[in-house]
Image: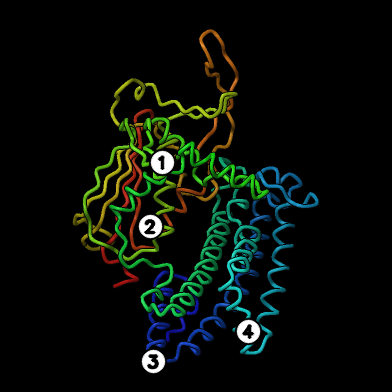
Amino acid sequence: MADAMWKFRTLADFWRLAGWLESRRQRGLDKQAMETCLVNMTGRIRAGIDEYERAALRLDACSGGCLSHPQSARRAEVSLPHGMTVLAFLQHMGGKLRKWFDGLAAKSGGEFMAEWFRTLDQQARYASLLNNLVQQFGNFETVSMTLPGSDDLTISKPVQQCLQQMFEINTRSIRMIELARSVRKAWQQGQPHGSTGFFNTRTDLALTTRAMVMEYMIEADPVRIQMHKEQARGAGKPYAHYRFWRAAETVRQLGQVAYGDPPQRHPVQRRRYVDLDVRPSPHVCTDSLRLEWAFKEILNNALGATSSMFMTVNGVVVEPLARHAGDNPNPAIRLGVKTMNAWLGWRKREIIRLTISDEGAGIAPDILEKIHYWGFSFRKPRVSVLAEAPGKKADSQEITIGGKGIGVPFAMNVFREHGGRMKIHSVPDQGTTITIDLPIKPPFCN
């Protein structure tokens, strides 16, 4: 097997590894193959912990001490123990992870495999590992939020190089663990096709786009939300918002979503706020979870550009831009999926083109040229006034969707990994169109 496969740098490396594992399983060598995979994976994740910490130290140095600033946790909007800075907490978690992986690597073959299998098989242990490695230690969102955002420092080459390296290490670590767990579960169940891991070899992008909008409407169902709150209260746990609840609530209110009878409560958009022009397209091979997440990041920006959300004493209220107000306005956002031939790279090939077009606030030229940088954003909260009742006014806090400088560069990286590209065209006060071209035969699945 090629040495490059164990570097885990590209989607092609993971795809080749998945194929190699399955070929070994078919020859009855699954135990040896899994051990080889886990040994290499352990070493790479352990090295990645050191790489990530060194990159964080460089980032702190070239950003003027943003991560080690006493107010770094406040800037990142996180609560850390004992008043730690973001850098100190990262180093603390890095030390704990190093100890665990060093102890794992020191075990003999049988004990080593048994410990890994316990971690992969038991949901609590698996979730704990991912939480420590990704949410606590490698929380890329926390790191980028310590930066000044719109300042030129954020887009400087040294800062961007550190952020890109940290993102790649973070993504690589998650994928390695996801692949190992999915292969383990597939082999236990005698399902060889599952050894492709996080790859979905038959991704339907037309269905994915429709399901994305449907998911927002379902997750914004007030009855569903209340049920989840009661379940959390009964279990003595805090209620956790849906990750994209702001976007979901925007779709629900501005699409005037109605819900059917229980228990399904099927949602129906009575007003075409988000319009779909989605045509059937060939199935493609993708890292479907991250690809869908990238689509959501772009759609969230479109929803934020075409509306304003306020927190009032009466709850969350969403208002469209003036040109989309009224009983039956034109759709503010249009999603399209179609198959076509286009130039992608240096040759013409068959592609699937996805477009997300909005008639929103648009992006100023000076912002558009920087929007692809990690951590670049404006995070100044604004206070607006919203009428609660005739003759009565009350101050209300405006809520912004996104604004952390992660969504666009993340999406661009995901599309690039799939052999595709993303283009942005925007006119201030008129709207933005984002075009995503993906090859029907991605390079890593050819």
User: Taking 114 as reference, is 349 left or right?
Assistant: left
Mark 2 or mark 1, whichever is nearer to me: 1
Label 2 vs 3, first from the N-terminus: 3
Label 4 vs 1, first from the N-terminus: 4
Residue ID for mark 4: 112
Q: Amino acid at mark 2?
A: Phe
Seen from this angle, which residue lies furthest right? Answer: 82
Residue ID for mark 2: 415
Secondary structure type for disc 3: loop
Mark 2 or mark 3, whichever is nearer to me: 3
Question: Observer-nearest residue: 112 or 307?
Answer: 112
Residue ID for mark 1: 262
Q: What mark, if any, has residue 27 been given in the picture?
A: 3
Separation of residues labelled 4 and 3 (CA atoms): 23 Å
Separation of residues labelled 3 and 1 (CA atoms): 50 Å
Residue 429 position in % (x across, y down): 38, 28
Would residue 2 be visible to someone looking at this image? yes
Mark 3 or mark 1, whichever is nearer to me: 1
Residue lying at 41% horizontally and 44% vertically, measured from the top left: 263
Which quadrant of the structure image shows residue 285?
Answer: bottom left
Label 3 vs 1, first from the N-terminus: 3
Residue 385 position in % (x across, y down): 55, 18
Secondary structure type for disc 1: loop
User: Cβ–Cβ below 8 Å for labels 4 and 3?
Assistant: no
Secondary structure type for disc 2: helix
